[in-house]
Structure formats: C-alpha cells, structure tokens
Image: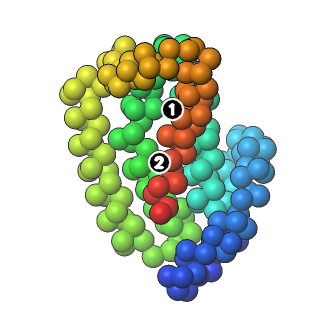
Amino acid sequence: MALPLVKTAAACTDFSRTVLPYIPQLGALPQQFYQSATDLQALKQLYLNTNPLISAFAFSLALVPIVLVLSEINRNYSQIDRLWSLLPTFYNVHYVAYAHAKRLPTQRLDSLAILSIVWSARLTYNYWRKGGYQIGSEDYRWKIVKDYVNNPVIFFLFNVIFVSLAQSVWVSIMLEI
C-alpha cells in the first residue's frame, strides 16, 4: 500500500505512520524506475505503488545533479532560482494526478492545482519579464555570497549542499508541512 490509513488529524502528523514506513521505497525506486523505463504500464504501476511523498522527494533528489552541473558549467548559481516558480506547482499537480489515478476524492486538490497553476504562471511571467530566464542572468545575491566566501572549494561545497540539494529538497518537503 502506498498511502497510510489515517482517520484523525493527529494520525496525519505521526511521522512513524505517514512517512517512516515508506522510506525504504526511496532506496528501491531508482532500480525499479530503470527496470520499468521502457514499459508505460509498468511505470504507471510503479507510480501507483510508490507513496507520492517518496516519489516527489526522489524527483527533488534527481534535480540535484542537473542543477549542480548546470551551475558549475555556467558559473551561474541561479539555476535553481529558475525552477522556484514552477516546482511547487509541479509537486501539487503530482499529488493531484496521484489522487486521480488512485480514484480518491479530488475536488479540493483540483482547486488547489488550478490556483497553484495560476500563481505559478504569474510568478514565472514576472521572473521572465525581469530577465530571470535570460542566458547569463544571475540573482545579485549570489555575487555577494561568492565575494564573501572567496574560496572556490568552500563555495563548491556550498553549491552542492545548499544551492543544489537543500533548495531542491526544501521545496518538495515544504508542500507537505
């Protein structure tokens, strides 16, 4: 079973019931995904059999090397910034799609997804309008941080731990709180 059976608000907040039993799915997910990658029906079954929190967390981890490599190649640490207006909606739509696929009640989730899409479109448009998606654009604060750190090794570790990992994971987790 991919979802815990909870009937009270207190049960919903019980980490040992709602998250802990599903953490082993995270370790098995890459191999299962690789084995199912060419079979659409197997991918759908994997999606349905995996707790949606775990699959969202796995996606956030999959973004880490992409963002890290792009930021290091371009020496531009705003790669994750370009995703900030899109990721919350991606995760919301993921939860809605999962609920629909499991044939769960979705009226509130559908409303959430619509509002999230509208909000994301507004944020993305404003970020684009201000030049955030232009090649070479970088948030002014990264220059301040780079100048303050002034050590390439320490800044690389900062890029791995905070810029690429923590920010990607933080967005996926904050939607659960």
Residue 108 as seen in the image, left or right of residue 167: left
Name the mark on residue 171: 2
Instruction: Return the x and y of residue 161 as percentages of the image width and height.
Output: 59, 34
Tell me the residue that label 1 is attached to.
163
Local secondary structure at mark 1? helix
Q: Residue at x 55, y 86 (%)?
A: 7
Q: Amino acid at mark 2?
A: Val
* Tag 1–tag 2 contact (CB < 8 Å): no
Q: Is 124 in front, or is 17?
A: 17
Q: Please, what is the three-letter code of the amino acid marked with disc 1?
A: Val
Which residue is rendered at x = 50% and y = 74% of the image? 104
- The x and y percentages for residue 166 are 54, 41
Assign the N terminus to one quadrant of the image. Answer: bottom right
Please, is residue 153 above or below residue 141 in the view? above
Q: Which mark, residue 144?
A: none
118 over 149 or under it: above or below: below
Left or right: where does residue 139 sit relative to residue 176? left
Residue positioned 60% across, 29% down in the render: 160
* Residue 149 horizontal/vertical position (percent): 49, 20
